[in-house]
Amino acid sequence: MKYTGTISRGVKAPLIRKGDNLINIINESLYNLVNNDNVVLQDGDVLCITESVVAISQGNFATTNQIAEDVSKKFDADVVGLVFPILSRNRFSILLKGIRKGVKKLIVQLAYPSDEVGNRLITEDELIKANINPYQDAFSSSEFKRIFKDTKHEFTGVDYIKYYQEIIGDDCEIILANNSTEILKYTDSVIVASIHNRKRIKELLIKNGGKKVISLDEILNNPVETSGYNTKYGLLGSNLFTEDSVKLFPRDCETLVYEIQSQIKHKFNKHLEVMVYGDGAFKDPRGGIWELADPVVSPGFTKGLEGTPNEIKLKFLANKVNDEEAIKKLIKEKGNNLVGKMESQGTTPRQLVDLLGSLADLTSGSGDKGTPFVLIQNYFNNYASN
C-alpha cells in the first residue's frame, strides 16, 4: 500500500453477550476479514476494541438497587447533595434513579447554561439577554423556569430540569448554580458527579466545609453482592443497559490488550498494537457537545501507543525545501522529540490513544453498524515511508 495513507476499517463481529470469549471472537473476526475481504494485516496496525463489548463480555453490570445500597452505605445524612451531573438519558438518568433510592432526600445542583460536556439548557445569548452572571447567580428550578421558559435540549427535545425532577420526586429539589459550594447551603454530604474536573470540585467542597464528599468513581468501586464494579472509575463511564441497570466501564483492560496482542501474534504472526476505546475526544461544532462522557478515551492500551505524535508539518518543509528527496531525508532524520521545535508547530499535540480512539469511535459509530472492532492501518507511516 505504497500510495495509501491511513485506513480506518470497521470489523464486523457477532453480537457479544455476557460470558463470551472476547479474544476468540476477535481472532475469528480478523480471520474472516483476512480470508474473505482480502485484508492484509501488517506489523504496526492498531486494533481498537470498543469498551462496551469488553464490559458486556465481563458481565460488568449493576442495578439501581445495587447503586442505592452502595450510596446508602457511604452516607449517614438525611440530605445528600449531587453536584453537576451531565444531562443525559443514556449516561445519567439511570444513575440518578439509583442514587435517589439510596438517600432520604436529594438536592441536585445543575450547571448552566450547559453541563460539563456541552449539553445546553439555554444558550449563552439568552444568558446575556437576561443580564445574568453565571459565575455568581444561583436559582431554584422554579426561578430559572420563570426566566427561561424553554429549557428543552436542542437535539433530543428533552427538558432535563423537568425530567430529572420526575426521577427524584417532588420531595427533592433541583437548583442551578455554577459555584459548586452553593450545595453546601443545603448539606455537607455531597456526591460530585463531574467527570473530568471531579478532583478539583471535591477538594473545593471539602475546603469550604464539606464533611462527606465523594465522586462517582467512589461508588461501585467494589462489588455490591453480585454487581459489577470498577476499582478505578466506579460509576464513571457507565451507561444505560436496561430500564433498571447500567453497564459499567470495563475492568482489567491493561491485561486484556496484551493478551489480545499475544494471541494475534500467535495466530497471524503480526505484531499489532491494541487498545480499548470509549468516547472519542471531539466537539460538535453546531451543538457545542463535547463527546467525551467517559473518564478517558482509552482505559487500556499496549506500550506502542504511549505518547504523542512526533511529526513534522509537511507544508513547513515544502515552503523551505524544494527537493522532494531532501524533504524525505529530513523526515527520516527528524529525531524522536520535536516538542517545541518550529517544524512541528501546527501538528496535533494530543495523546496517540486519544487521536486513535476518536478515529475508531467515528468509524464504529454508536448505532447498528455492527463493527465493535476497528482496524487502523498505516497510521504511523509518513511521506517518507516506502
Image (tube, rainbow, N blue to C red):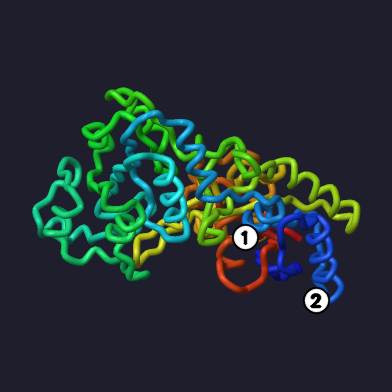
Q: Residues within 10 Å of mark 1 (few under 14, many from 20)?
A: few
Q: Is residue 88 visible?
A: yes
Q: From the viewer's perspective, is residue 99 above or below residue 374? A: above
Identity of the residue furthest to the bottom in this view: 36
**Residue situated in front as seen by the camera: 295 or 168:** 168
For marks 2 and 1, give the one nearer the viewer: 2
Question: Where is residue 46, by image quadrant?
Answer: bottom right
User: Measured from the top left, where is residue 154 in percent x and y?
Assistant: 31, 68
Q: At 64% across and 49% down in the image, what residue appears?
A: 60
Q: Secondary structure at mark 1?
A: loop
Residue drawn at x 64%, y 61% as measured from the top left:
324
Q: Which residue is mark 1?
A: 323
Q: Can you see residue 46? A: no
Residue beneath label 2, please? 37
Q: Residues within 10 Å of mark 2 (few under 14, many from 20)?
A: few
Q: Quadrant of the C terminus?
A: bottom right
Q: Nearer the viewer, residue 105 or 110?
A: 105
Q: Of the numbered discs in the image, which one, if any, rests on residue 86?
A: none
Q: Are marks 2 and 1 in contact (CB under 8 Å)?
A: no
Nearer-the-camera pick, 153 or 276: 153
Q: Residue at x 55, y 39 (%)?
A: 220
Q: Is residue 53 left or right of residue 184?
A: right
- Give amino acid for label 1: Asp
Side of 71 relative to 132 (left or right): right
